[in-house]
Amino acid sequence: MTSLRRARESKGLSQAATAALLNVSLSAYNRWERGAANPRFEDAAKMLAKLSKLRPPPKGAALERERAAATERFRFGEAMRRARVSAGWTQEELARAVGCQPSEISRHERGIILPDSPRLRAIRRTLSMRGAP
């Protein structure tokens, strides 16, 4: 088992979650973990810094709060994606309309992050979303 894999598993992360955290593709992260490729020095330094700052996986009540937050992010993302598709917008068009990058729209729709209040208002206004968190 590689040290990268041990570090990832000690934090309770999947490869996909780690790749998203590090903002790299899953295939790139997988190659690093298997030793089939090596990250650039800058990427390795960022990876180490991010992984070392993570807390161990939550347990008990903290785990339930984490699950509830993840469920909220996922539900919002699904509602946002449905509203965007129904309105006939692409992620790129919506990003331009609300003043952000398409990758941010993608992260919202995948339930990785919730938008901050100003961005949420802009998204709701643009897509005419009702009842979204």
Image: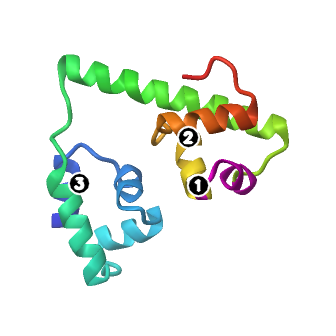
**Residue 103 x %, y %:** 56, 57
Judging by the rendered image, the residue that carries numbered circle 1 is 100
Magenta segment range? 92-101
Q: Secondary structure at mark 3?
A: helix
**Residue 13 x %, y %:** 29, 46
From what the image shows, is residue 105 above or below residue 50?
Answer: above
- Counting residues from the start of the chain, the first of labels 3 and 2 encountered is 3
Cα gap from disc 3 to disc 1, whole angstroms: 30 Å
Label 2 crowding class (10 Å Cα cut-off): few <14, some 14-19, many 20+?
A: some
Residue at screen point 78% across, 40% down: 85
**Residue 15 x %, y %:** 36, 54
Q: Are marks 1 and 2 in contact (CB under 8 Å)?
A: yes
The majority secondary structure of the magenta stretch comes to helix
**Residue 73 x %, y %:** 48, 31
**Residue 1 showing in the rendered view:** no
**Residue 62 or residue 10, whichever sits in front:** 62
**Residue 34 or residue 120, whichever sits in front:** 120
Judging by the rendered image, the residue that carries numbered circle 3 is 8
Give yes or no for residue 96 being in the magenta stretch.
Answer: yes
From what the image shows, is residue 35 above or below residue 15?
Answer: below
